[in-house]
Amino acid sequence: MEQSPVFRLCEGATARRAGVLDRWLAGRLQAVIEPAAVRLELWDGTCSYAATHPPIGTLVLRDRRTLIGLLVDPDVWFGEAYTAGDLEIRGDIGVVIEALSRIALGAPTLKERIRGALAASNTLASARRHVRHHYDLGNAFYEQWLDRDLVYTCAYFPQRDMTLEEAQHAKFDLICRKLRLRPGESVVEAGCGWGTLALYMARQYGVRVKAFNVSREQLAYARARAAREGVADRVEFIDDDYRNVKGKYDAFVSVGMLEHVGARQFAAMSDVLRRTVRHSGRGLLHFIGRDARRPLNAWILRRIFPGAYAPTLAEVAERVLTPAGMSVLDVENLRLHYARTLAHWRQRFASVEDSVRAEYGAAFQRAWELYLAGSQAAFGTGWMQLFQVVFAPVDTPPPYWTRADMYAPQDHECTASTR
């Protein structure tokens, strides 16, 4: 049987023999990952995997620096080494990352707690910088692997065999039903992405929307699409930070933005809700969250989502909603829907990885491959949650008696094609 290029490279690396210390350190690391049935191989082919069951995959290390880094600070070094090509994963990367994630589940480490305590606050300037780091990579990049509407948040799969496009529109409609949107109402959206939800709300539910965003690439796309689809008179895309929202609205919605606010800005978010949601209004927060307080993975913060923080439900209730005078009406966890969404994204990204590598470089392609695989594993294992929280002012009657019609699509008074 022909061996893979990675395996031939590892066999050919015998000029740099692993020493006694290298083999001892490798044994320590192998003991940590062996419960995941993951094998460790050094640059000269040395391996100490001793489990009786076959491994599900192999981590191949290219040098001693990577070995030490994985022992001292795996949260950073795993991603750095994989991106640089100093760590290869032999086997299905998704399977290997999920197995490693499962054995890492547990209470936050001291290092994580220290990093969380030292995290900087997202100022107006740094927040704009962080958003542009990730979302202003160019619309052409995202067009290669997202759905046709460029929706970059968790989809909703009421039927498991839905296409990604169908599931994203099912998510939009679920949000609108949870908010009980009615024609003529005013909606403010904090963090609107490429604008698809804002356009959907205006087109399908007849509401007027002000959507705030600080990504220039996304705003340019959203404004052009609104004009093209003839709804620019009902949707205004505003280049500004959520903290600068003014006015009163019937509904507040934020999808995939709260995780970018940062724990030190929860008071600012709370103030926005307090002064923008009408007495008879309601709102919905759709966000990546946690069951227990801990910072995001250090490599993700460094390379993918600087300034981000996934809050717990308790933090959102105590530090965002309660100070704003809001009462929680409904909570739903869609984490497995996000795992399925990420499976779609990974498949699409893999189909264009050659063009991504050619345009952005091998390190960029490997970083995004790892980020998507790690994210799917996080939601699949329960490391991460995806919460939808519906809220309203505490002295306002809830807009529904039961939850039944949230999950039964209704006829809209305002309808049009979805594209």
Image (cartoon, rainbow, N blue to C red):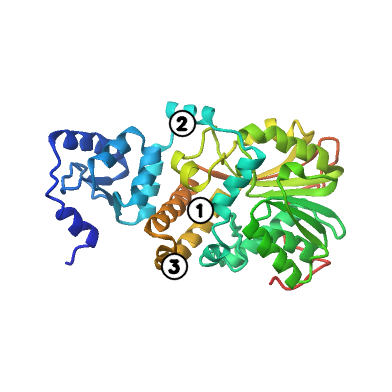
Is 101 displayed left or right of 253 in the figure?
Answer: left
Secondary structure, mark 1, is helix
Secondary structure, mark 2, is helix
- Chain-order first, disc 3 or disc 1: 1
Name the one closer to the observer, 220 or 66.
220
Residue 127, position in %: x, y? 62, 43
Q: Residues within 10 Å of mark 1 (few under 14, many from 20)?
A: many
Q: Quadrant of residue 227?
A: bottom right
Above or below for 25 versus 306: above
Residue 322, position in %: x, y? 74, 32
Q: CA distance from mark 3 to mark 1?
A: 20 Å
Q: CA distance from mark 2 to mark 1?
A: 24 Å
Is 345 displayed left or right of 313 in the figure?
Answer: left
Q: Please, which residue is most extreme toward the front here?
A: 125
Above or below for 175 versus 159: above
**Residue shown at the point (43%, 28%) measured from the top left:** 111
Tag 1: amino acid: Ala
Quadrant occupied by the N terminus: bottom left
- Chain-order first, disc 2 or disc 1: 2
- Chain-order first, disc 3 or disc 2: 2
Name the one closer to the observer, 194 or 351.
194
Residue 112's disc is: 2
The residue where tag 1 is placed is 339
